[in-house]
């Protein structure tokens, strides 16, 4: 099997900033509560004309430029999200078309906030086996369209954005050194959108009950996240044959600073080695990790030869981790 690694990264954040203060006139909340409970100060909100595939397109384009790869060379486009443009067609097809990735296969992948990690895991298999050479993996979300701005439990947490990576073959022994993925459907009711699917199609009643928006049991998800973040990181380390001391940089899913803090403590990683962006962007679900990765790469916090651990978790419930020799 060939080694697979990251040839380039890119990200895109909508211009509009929504601060914690802005929520004070919308729901019964305040900046202090949001900051101290979550670590979030502000988030980006997509413009009315922007859908998930638009954000994905911009991030994908930047990743291609960074990798020095033309769109026509891409064999496969995977878009990970939980807020796609529409049921049909797949957002990945729209992105591939707009990029000019004419020979690429394209599909969407949905494991909520874990979608980028799953996407990299899936994309890497095609390259490792030799079927494909270059795969574009994108995590993109317009969470602001699926959250309820009347529900203070959820609306303050999320933000919009997109991050992308071009995967390709790399020198043997470098790149993605291990993959660990997991899912536990029994936790599905902790984080879900009740209506709009085949279980409960849209109706006047679902609209009135606001069932087309995200519902979350915050404390259940919190407990799950604290447990699974550390476990998934250790699984990736074990499978790569690394120890905690080998970690140069940790990129966790950005849902809550307290969750990140606790997993960094378990891994005994100082916070200087942990990428944080939720203070500026909130929880961008599938986009959190690739945006963090892109900013860390471009701002020089990750150097060639570094050993990284990426860990995601999300609705499903799902989780996933990658050990990457950069
Ligand atoms: N402003 C003010 N008060 C609030 C707000 C708010 N925005 N939101 C909730 N509260 C209130 C609650 O109503 C509750 O009030 P009550 O005691 O009168 O009922 C009180 O604050 C305390 O609520 P807790 O749930 O105990 O608060 P906690 O400290 O656990 O923090 C939080 C809540 C931030 C949601 C936390 O549980 C969390 O981060 N959970 C994980 C969420 C997460 O990661 N979700 C995304 C997963 S990834 C994906 O797939 C999309």
Image (cartoon, rainbow, N blue to C red):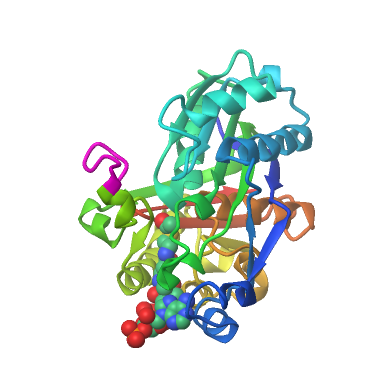
Above or below, 122 relative to 140: above
Q: Is residue 6 visible from the viewing direction of this image?
A: no
Majority secondary structure in the magenta region: loop
Q: Position of residue 240 (x, y in %)?
A: 48, 51
Q: Position of residue 32 (x, y in %)?
A: 57, 86
* Front residue of this view, candidates 244 and 20: 20
Above or below, 84 relative to 247: above
| Residue 247 in which image quadrant | bottom right
Residue drawn at point x = 44 percent, y = 67 percent = 150
Residue drawn at point x = 68 percent, y = 19 percent = 100
* Front residue of this view, candidates 89 and 4: 89
Taking the magenta stretch, the answer to whether it contains residue 200 is: yes
Q: Position of residue 145 (x, y in %)?
A: 50, 50
* Front residue of this view, candidates 140 and 116: 140
For the image, the number of numbered tags is 0
Q: Position of residue 112 (x, y in %)?
A: 42, 49
Q: Is residue 257 visible from the viewing direction of this image?
A: yes
* Front residue of this view, candidates 65 and 95: 95
For this orientation, the residue located farthest to the top is: 103
Residue drawn at point x = 54 percent, y = 63 percent = 254
Above or below, 268 relative to 78: below
Horizontally, is 312 left or right of 17 in the view?
left
| Residue 136 in which image quadrant | top right
Above or below, 236 relative to 277: above
Q: Which residues are magenta?
A: 195-204
Horizontally, is 167 left or right of 261 in the view?
right
- Ligand 1 rendered quadrant: bottom left
Taking the magenta stretch, the answer to whether it contains residue 58 is: no
């Amino acid at each position: 099997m060939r080694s697979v690694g990251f040839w380039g990264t890119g990200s895109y954040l909508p211009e509009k900033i929504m601060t914690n203060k802005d929520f004070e006139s919308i729901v019964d909340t305040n900046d202090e509560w949001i900051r101290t409970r979550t670590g979030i100060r502000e988030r980006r909100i997509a413009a009315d004309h922007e859908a998930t595939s638009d954000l994905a397109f911009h991030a994908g384009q930047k990743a291609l430029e960074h990798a020095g790869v033309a769109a026509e060379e891409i064999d496969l486009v995977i878009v990970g999200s939980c807020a796609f443009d529409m049921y049909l067609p797949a957002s990945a097809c729209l992105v591939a078309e707009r990029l000019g990735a004419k020979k690429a296969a394209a599909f969407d992948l949905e494991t909520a906030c874990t979608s980028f990690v799953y996407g990299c895991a899936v994309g890497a298999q095609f390259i490792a086996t030799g079927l494909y050479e270059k795969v574009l993996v994108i995590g993109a979300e317009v969470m602001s369209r699926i959250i309820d701005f009347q529900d203070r439990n959820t609306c303050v947490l999320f933000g919009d954005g997109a991050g992308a990576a071009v995967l390709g073959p790399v020198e043997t022994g470098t790149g993605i050194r291990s993959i660990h993925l997991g899912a536990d459907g029994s936790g599905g009711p902790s984080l879900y959108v009740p209506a709009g699917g085949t279980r409960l199609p849209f109706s006047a009643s679902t609209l009135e009950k606001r069932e087309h928006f995200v519902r979350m049991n915050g404390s259940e998800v919190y407990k799950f996240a604290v447990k699974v973040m550390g476990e998934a990181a250790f699984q990736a380390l074990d499978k790569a044959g690394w120890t905690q001391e080998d970690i140069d940089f940790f990129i966790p899913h950005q849902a809550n600073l307290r969750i990140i803090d606790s997993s960094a403590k378990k891994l005994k990683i100082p916070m200087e080695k942990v990428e944080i962006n939720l203070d500026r962007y909130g929880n961008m679900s599938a986009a959190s990790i690739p945006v963090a990765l892109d900013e860390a790469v471009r701002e020089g916090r990750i150097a060639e030869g570094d050993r990284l651990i990426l860990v995601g978790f999300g609705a499903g419930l799902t989780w996933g981790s990658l050990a990457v020799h950069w």
